[in-house]
Image (cartoon, rainbow, N blue to C red):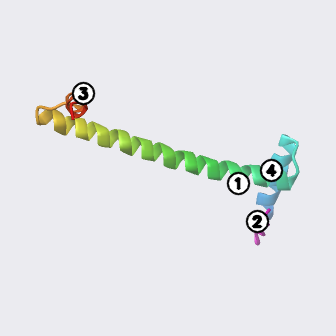
Amino acid sequence: MAQITVEDLDPWVVEKLEARAQRQGRSLAVELRAILTAAVEEREAEEQRQTVTAAVEGFRRLRQKLSLAGLSVQGLTEEGRRF
């Protein structure tokens, strides 16, 4: 496992982190690992949400363009099955 050193933290930050760790019944090291892991997981989940949102929006735009052209996704699917 990698080690990380963080220099020049304000003492009040360390105090708050220690207090948080104590409330959770964890050591400071375990609490810091939990905080960092949660932050990374949250960021990855947000990136996935953005990807899904972009895909859904792209599909909506495609459906709208097809509709304006007098086509439908279902019609194209059925047309594709004949080939």
Give the mark nearer the N terminus: 3 vs 4.
4
Foreground tag (3 vs 1): 3
Task: Say left or right for 4 vs 53.
Answer: right
| Disc 2 to disc 1, C-alpha distance | 18 Å
Label 3, secondary structure: give it: helix
| Disc 3 to disc 1, C-alpha distance | 46 Å
Give the mark nearer the N terminus: 4 vs 2.
2
Foreground tag (2 vs 1): 1
Circles 3 and 4: CB atoms closer than 8 Å: no
Task: Say left or right for 64 vs 42.
Answer: left
Which disc is residue 10 wearing? 2
Give the mark nearer the N terminus: 4 vs 1.
4
Circles 2 and 1: CB atoms closer than 8 Å: no
Circles 4 and 1: CB atoms closer than 8 Å: no
* The magenta stretch spans residue 4: yes
Give the mark nearer the N terminus: 3 vs 2.
2
Foreground tag (3 vs 2): 3
Give the mark nearer the N terminus: 2 vs 1.
2
| Disc 3 to disc 4, C-alpha distance | 52 Å
Residue 75 or 21: which is nearer the viewer? 75
Label 2, secondary structure: give it: loop
User: How many residues crowd mark 1 within 10 Å: few (<14), some (14–19), many (20+)?
Assistant: few
What x and y, as percent, mark residue 57? 33, 41
| Disc 4 to disc 2, C-alpha distance | 18 Å
Disc 3: which residue:
74
Which disc is residue 31 wearing? 4
Residue type at mark 4? Glu
Foreground tag (3 vs 4): 3
Magenta residue span: 1-9
What x and y, as percent, mark residue 54? 37, 45
